[in-house]
């Protein structure tokens, strides 16, 4: 592997808020070897003059397989959105559709500076997601979704409990630690999983030391239906089935009682805040300042292309920095806090802060370089303010993962953008023709 | 003037929601001459294959002169933000600062596809804004701000009432209808203007057939202070001084009672919705669905770089389409409604819908062309959904105003981006050194 020197950037290590300095980063064997003023080195040089150099962004809740349904599912609340669009779409996806969708989604993530994502799969063909991710070089935590009950779920994506879990185990054995991939056990949510599925999912994950990921407390209708079904609050139910802990990332957490929040805190369960999707699906605004006050780990995620409709960490940062100010005042969620959520806290949520999430010697060289070409990044000012409020995904110039250059001058090095888009368009037409709506 | 044929685009005329079609636009003498399938013409051809072709975006509340303060005024609520940052900044601005700031702001607007803006000036050197706008080609409605009272206002930007209005009249006589420029009379807001100033401003505007623009009902603290000062609600006070009507655009309207809303409706006063700034300054969320239900004309604006921190119509559209869904449900503010606010309704608010705001034969050729290169614009789908939810300002490729090509391939044709930025940086340093904070 080629060694790389990133020269003359504004380094924003994200170890703590407010710290940044002009400097260089030397990458050897995929790791950060040195940070500071590095005179020269016998390696490839990336000139980062007038650029911000950051730890690669981390999104802890995305659905790359939903990418073909982008712009096809607006103006619906969560449960209708699932029933009327998303589940019929997933039921109609074949292997080629899964591949085209995840390729489009991963391309968008990488081009927008996201180097690590926690990804939610669909029922079938999850092999194709991993194969695609492996080829594209992203650090992907992913798993197939499990659904073994629920009246509105199309039969094509409803599975026998035991079969579904066995497939997860097979997938995990094949793909976990295969390059930059990690297997995650992912039952969809309480409403489409039996209690036995939830419990067995927990067992499967813990036996293998894999993470657990699901949706919880997203919309008020979902919360009510979970209560009716399980006779418990969503978090109490998850506690009952063992689905809480340091190895669990719950997407959303919009509607959470004080007692549920205490349970999340006591169990050290992680929350992924998805403000864009929560607004678009009319779900509400998660009380992130309250989570943070309670020292609950909160990461960020763009959720799915049909409910956002971007996979941009920049949009989510900008929203996370602003939507909470109405309730909590203008000092809630300053730009450094939010930038931390999009980097360091994402790594903490995934329990890999020892490996990525900050720029530190010895860590994997997952690095995003943001150029300051846009007018909205001028004049200069605090880097966190510029990145959170002033930048968009198109300001990302270069992306490295494990020291491998994946994006250079805003282009994927190993892929033609138009081929990805054409493939997605063809796959969408084929999927649409099969969709029963 | 060169005639231009825009070929093979997806035309989105914005005359009514949901309508779009593949076609061409012929521009002659700065106006739209023909729309449809145009075989050939003896003129410059712009290939718009795989692009959306729209009426240029219209923002009805921006502060281009505040551009140097971008990223320097986060985490403050409105009145603190004015007192601690924005007024000291405006007090420190000199003519070169005004020019550099407006140049940066107008560059950002044009590159992001905004062809017309209603702009709020500062107290002095407003000549420089018009000179800059004239040189850059934007269609700008603008005026100096008036402040003749208010305890927190620095003396440098507080003026004698009569002098202030006389300067406005002189500016208006010089610049109104000078090329694409219009003069607008702009007292800052009730808290920094005497009643006599407000009344005389109204007289001045109506005598000359100029528009009126001010801030109103933005934050709860402002609303309370206006009530204390005037013994009336803000809108009742504006009614008393004659500052309501079809020729009045009020920025914000976040905190408005039912009775105030009725007054706005009865007087046909226009509202400019600025969701980004309203979130960032912790002001709240204007009830736009309620305005629309009451047939009040609502336009969009990004407000100022220090309170947003972008001037992107795309961010404002995405916010306007999502923030209202929490209160009003997922069908509130669909993408077409929002895209209409950013084009047709902006023109209606400015009373120039007969000239711009839609793509129609005979109208001025103010046109924005959006390329579909970004992953977030794939696969295809409803154009409004793609533009409102999937696009950012960087997706704008070409911009025409009065048929003049201003932006081509995402570059300003007559300006070097880096020179604008360097000039802004130098002016910011000089302004900062003079700021008394």
Image (tube, coloured by chain):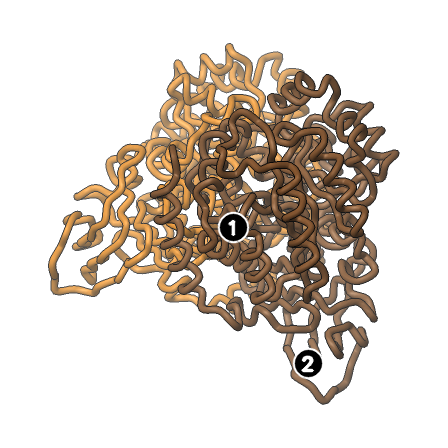
Chain colours: A orange, B brown
Nearer mark to the viewer, of 1 and 2: 2
Could you say which quadrant of the image residue A396 lies in?
bottom left
Q: Chain of mark 1?
A: A
Image coordinates of residue A90 in percent, x first then y, are: 62, 46
Q: Is residue A166 left or right of residue A56?
A: right
Query: Residue B407, how many percent across, how many down?
Result: 57, 68
Q: In which chain is the residue bearing label 2?
A: B
Question: Is residue B246 or residue B179 the one in the foreground?
Answer: B179
Viewer-proximal residue among B244 and A126: B244
For residue A125, the mark is: 1
Residue under the image location 49 percent in, 56 percent down: B99
Mark 1 closeness class: few <14, some 14–19, many ≥20 residues within 10 Å: some
Say yes or no: labels 1 and 2 on the same chain.
no
Instruction: Name the residue tied to disc 2.
Output: B1
Q: Residue at x 49, y 34 (%)?
A: B155
Disc number placed over residue B91 in the picture, else none: none
> For the residue carrying disc 2, how many other residues have a C-alpha within 10 Å: few (<14), some (14-19), or many (20+)?
few
Position of the C terminus of chain B by quadrant: top left
**Image quadrant containing the N terminus of chain B:** bottom right
Cα–Cα span, label 1 and label 2: 58 Å
Depicted B435 relative to depicted A415: above or below = above
């Amino acid at each position: 592997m080629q060694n790389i020197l990133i020269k003359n950037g504004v380094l924003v290590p994200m170890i703590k808020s407010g710290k940044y300095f002009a400097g260089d980063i030397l990458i050897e064997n995929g790791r950060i070897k040195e940070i500071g003023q590095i005179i020269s080195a016998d390696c490839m040089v990336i000139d980062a003059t007038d650029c911000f150099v950051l730890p690669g962004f981390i999104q802890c809740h995305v659905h790359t397989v939903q990418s073909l349904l982008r712009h096809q599912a607006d103006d619906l609340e969560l449960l209708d959105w699932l029933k009327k669009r998303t589940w019929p779409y997933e039921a109609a996806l074949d292997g080629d559709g899964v591949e085209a969708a995840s390729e489009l989604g991963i391309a968008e993530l990488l081009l927008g500076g996201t180097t690590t994502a926690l990804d939610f799969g669909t029922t079938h063909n999850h092999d194709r997601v991993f194969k695609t991710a492996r080829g594209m070089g992203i650090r992907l935590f992913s798993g197939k979704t499990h659904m073994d009950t629920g009246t509105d779920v199309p039969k094509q994506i409803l599975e026998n409990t035991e079969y579904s879990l066995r497939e997860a185990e097979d997938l995990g054995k094949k793909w976990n630690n295969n390059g930059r991939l990690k297997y995650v056990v992912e039952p969809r949510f309480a409403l489409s999983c039996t209690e036995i599925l939830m419990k067995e999912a927990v067992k499967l994950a813990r036996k293998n030391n894999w993470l657990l990921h699901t949706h919880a407390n997203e919309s008020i209708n979902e919360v009510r239906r979970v209560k009716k079904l399980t006779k418990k609050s969503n978090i109490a139910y998850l506690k009952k089935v063992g689905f809480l802990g340091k190895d669990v990332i719950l997407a959303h957490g919009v509607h959470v009682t004080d007692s549920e929040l205490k349970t999340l805190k006591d169990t050290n369960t992680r929350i992924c805040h998805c403000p864009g999707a929560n607004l678009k699906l009319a779900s509400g605004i998660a009380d992130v300042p309250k989570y943070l006050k309670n020292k609950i780990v909160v990461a960020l995620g763009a959720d799915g292309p049909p409910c956002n409709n971007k996979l941009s960490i920049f949009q989510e940062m900008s929203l996370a920095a602003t939507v909470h100010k109405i309730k909590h005042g203008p000092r809630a969620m300053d730009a450094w806090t939010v930038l931390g959520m999009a980097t360091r806290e994402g790594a903490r949520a995934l329990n890999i802060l020892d490996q990525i999430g900050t720029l530190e010697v010895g860590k994997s060289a997952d690095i995003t370089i943001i150029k300051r070409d846009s007018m909205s990044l001028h004049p200069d000012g605090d880097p966190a303010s510029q990145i959170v409020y002033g930048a968009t995904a198109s300001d990302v110039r270069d992306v490295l993962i494990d020291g491998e250059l994946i994006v250079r001058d805003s282009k994927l090095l190993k892929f033609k953008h138009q081929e990805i888009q054409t493939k997605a368009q063809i796959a969408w037409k084929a999927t649409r023709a099969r969709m029963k709506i």
